[in-house]
Amino acid sequence: MTRFDAPLHEGFTGPHVRDGGQVVGTVGVGRRTPVLSLRQVSKRFGAVEALVDVDLTVHPHEVVALVGDNGAGKSTLAKVVSGVIQPDAGLIEMDGEPTTIGSPSDAHQAGVATVFQDYALCENLDVTANLFLGRELRERSLMRDGEMERVARGILRDLTSRIPSVRTPIGHLSAGQRQTVAIARTLIGSPRLVILDEPTAALSVAHTAEVLTHIQRLRELGLGVVLISHNLNDVRAVSDRIEVLRHGRNNGSFDARSVTQEELLAAITGATQVSRAHPLDALR
Amino acid sequence: MSGSQSSLRGANRALVVETVKRYGGLTQVELTAATGLSPATVSSIVKELLAAGAVDTRSTIRSGRRAQLVTIARRTGLAAGVDVGRRHLRVALADVTREIVAEQSLPLPAEHRADTTLDRAALLVVDLLERLGASLDDLLGLGVGLPAPVEPGTGLVTVRGVLRGWDEVPVVHVLAKRLAKPVLVDNEANLGALAESRFGAARGYQDVVYVSVGAGTGAGIVLSGHLHRGFGGTAGEIGHVQVDPQGRICRCGSRGCLDTVVGYPALVEPLTETHGALTIRDVVQRAVEGDPGCRQVVADAGAVIGGVVAGMAMVVNPQCIVVGGELAQTGDVLVQPMREAIARRVPLNQVATLDVVPGELGVRASVLGALAMALEATDQAAVGGAPDIADHSDTPAGGGS
């Protein structure tokens, strides 16, 4: 039995094709059409201005982090994109096409998959059933259990997850494993954009490590990822770009590779104010 | 007939061992699901492996029920290896037979800070111990690798500025205080050299140069089987050899260092116009997939690094050069131009062609070296003599080696 020479590579499985998805690879990210583009999106709840003229652009193969204080509008924005709530004003484009996301199933149709803070998993069902909940594979009226299990195993392996069995009920899994299942569920149906709302909140360091590794995998699979988080350390570890929201408004856009913790904190707390981005900037 | 029966049995046994290793600890029920074997088969294989001393079992509770937790048998204690990179933290636990029993990596932000990262490293070690059903009492010691020259006794970075946010942090003291265990710290390229020369591509060679190419470039030197650290721990810091006298100022303070030419961000800069902002991981992935621009950048880096390594080889006269680090995952895209640059220096190839080979341990070389360092130290403490790897070559699984 060998010792230190077990599997060596964690990352690269070569070109990756998902049915209906894109081939990840040799095209540059710079000039591509954004998978999601929000322009001047606003949402009010009575007197509360949850979002005011917010812009957000996400490209394929890009992790964009949304950071901000409590109530800055991060989760509201996630809900707008995932069809849970409708904006009062503004334009949503998917792949350059104006799109209306009127309901969560519209969002699913458009290729948006969301993981909310509470995971929204069924405790009594097993991993496979949760992954395919509401989207079961059927042949006439019969469920194709074997096929679903096979796909479930494949996706969990893609994410390099540590869930031993796709037949384990969710109730038996740890918090970190549940988060993994919730992220894995986003990959059913070949999405183009994955939204993760506070995926590392209340996780141990080992589970945080797993989730951040999953996020890197989603990016390598060619997906656009929106990562909402309070933890600037986690955000700077896996993002390409960081967008700061403050009181429902854009307050700065930063390159995650070069921004410092101090600059981010200043933008989040309002120590630095960004002049309103011109709406036409998004068109460049 | 009976031959295929017993070989099936052997294959199933290997599958159970592999699965237990992959997940750290599993109950028998989980093991049945994860391997796809029948409960009776799993139960009898676990009994066999237990009798052979390959696995341990203990009672645990899973969702309110009593269950048997199966883990890989440990020979008296565990050591932890911690590899701190510029953008990652990798932690692995191994037992004294050098079998890795748990492993996890964590992406880190650029310019991560010593306090947060060391805190996370300590917590990750404890989390991994828990995954195995072990506790801190089982931990014999820690080996830590840093991407900078360090003073082994204290873990202080010896060249100011090369690892921002880590100057004047006594890593040994910080972690030893936290975990109350012996801690050893070394440079990541030195540890990679140690690992590759003990268990990797340079097994059996006495004089070896290991080159680690990633966000920065470094080298580790093994002379007559011993790691050569130098007086200030800066031996092999080829990332700070001058290659461009008119070049940029490096973070170390000198001008035109190798790292300012082929390190991050200089490496990805020529690609921004055509490819957008890329990370080192992206460049590696795309080069592997055949993107011509990314291959060009990696190959050109290989040629420049090869020139510097050729000079170093002239001084050290190694038997072989092992290339590791993140960029080495591109294989010959990086290694071939290095090989050519080194082949051009005639005296190096007089007796025999100087071998330039990719590492066998991949991006895990440093963490494996850190484990080896920690385990060798505990061996020395136990027997009071020189470390001897061969003493521990018995295999826990009872199979052939």
Image: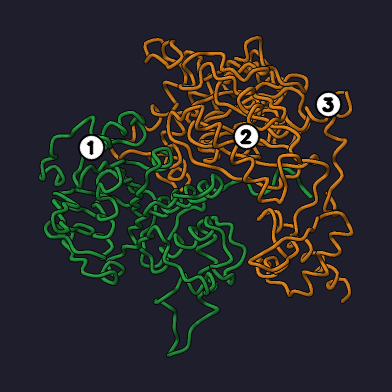
Q: Secondary structure at mark 2?
A: strand
Kind of residue indicated by mark 1: Gly
Residue A12 vs residue A100: left or right? right
The residue labelled by disc 1 is A252
The residue labelled by disc 3 is B380
Kind of residue indicated by mark 3: Gln
The answer to whether marks 1 and 2 sit on the same chain is no
Q: Secondary structure at mark 3?
A: helix
From where the camera sits, is residue B196 visible?
no
Q: Mark 3 packing: few (<14 Cα in 10 Å), some, or many (20+)?
A: few
Which comes before the other along the chain, label 2 or label 3?
A: 2
Residue farthest toward the front in the current orientation of the protein: A47
Q: Quadrant of residue B82?
A: top right
Spot occupied by residue B262 in the image (x, y as percentages of width and height): 44, 26
- Per the model, the C-alpha gap separating discs 1 and 2 is 36 Å
From where the camera sits, is residue B189 visible?
yes
- Per the model, the C-alpha gap separating discs 2 and 3 is 20 Å
Q: Secondary structure at mark 1?
A: strand
Which chain is disc 3 placed on?
A: B
Which chain is disc 1 placed on?
A: A
Chain A shade: green
Q: Quadrant of residue B369?
A: top right
Q: Nearer the viewer, residue A241 or B348?
A: A241
